[in-house]
Image (cartoon, grey):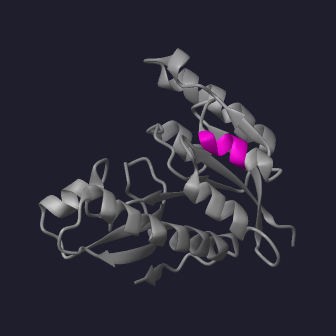
Amino acid sequence: MSPKRVAILISGGGSNMLTLLDSMTGDHPARPCLVLSNDPQAGGLAKAAARGVPVASVDHRPFKGDRAAFEAALLQPLLDSAPDILCLAGFMRVLTAEFVAQFEGRMLNIHPSLLPKYKGLHTHARALEAGDGEHGCTVHEVTAALDDGPILGQARVPVEQGDTQETLAARVLVQEHHLYPAVLRRYAAGDRSPIFLG
């Protein structure tokens, strides 16, 4: 069986993207086919290119207020690379239901909270404000609803006394780098049962 083709969407430095790229070797059931960003200056693009992965970017700024046109442009490099699976890895644009529908059942996202808690932004601050004893990250299938969709994996970290948003975010990121590659490997092999770490 030929490996599944994986496209990864990023907006910044791409630390999760790099852990995914580095995991897709040897007997892994998938291989990267594209790293795509909405920011031509995203640091992750050069890092992916240095690993020999095709890269593309579609700057969202000229499309201000016209999400449909931006997504149509974004779709072109994706369709050209014919991915089986899309991984959102710090992609900071909200995608429309129409876009998501084209990849339903084969698009993953990582979110820095224990969903269904804290959908959206500022998750670490919200966990601290709520006085939570634990926090973490979730990999889920992408559906039209924001940070919703079936949960494929979660990793938990304790909230420690004196934690700031930064210290908590740093510990969660370490777990993200364990969780996302583990979920992708199983998902690419056809196993959608959730993984729980920590």
Residue at image coords 79%, 53%: 51
Q: Nearer the viewer, residue 2 or 182?
A: 182
Quadrant position of residue 191:
bottom right
Task: Say whether residue 178 is magenta.
Answer: no
User: Going by the image, does 2 lie left or right of 198?
Assistant: right
What percent of the width, then of the height, locates residue 26?
A: 82, 76
What percent of the width, then of the height, locates residue 87?
A: 60, 55
* Range covered by the magenta-colored residues: 43-47
Q: Quadrant of the N terminus?
A: bottom right
Q: Nearer the viewer, residue 168 or 186?
A: 168
Quadrant position of residue 23:
bottom right
**Whether residue 1 is situated above or below residue 167 in the rendered picture:** below
Question: Most prominent secondary structure in the magenta stretch?
Answer: helix
Residue at image coords 72%, 49%: 48
Residue at image coords 70%, 48%: 47
Quadrant position of residue 106:
bottom right
Q: Nearer the viewer, residue 144 or 135?
A: 135
Q: Can residue 152 be seen at all in this image of the molecule?
A: no
What percent of the width, then of the height, locates residue 104?
A: 56, 53
**Whether residue 5 is situated above or below residue 195 in the rendered picture:** above
What percent of the width, then of the height, locates residue 117?
A: 26, 63
Residue at image coords 47%, 69%: 174
Q: Nearer the viewer, residue 32 or 129?
A: 129
In this view, the residue farthest toward the front is 162
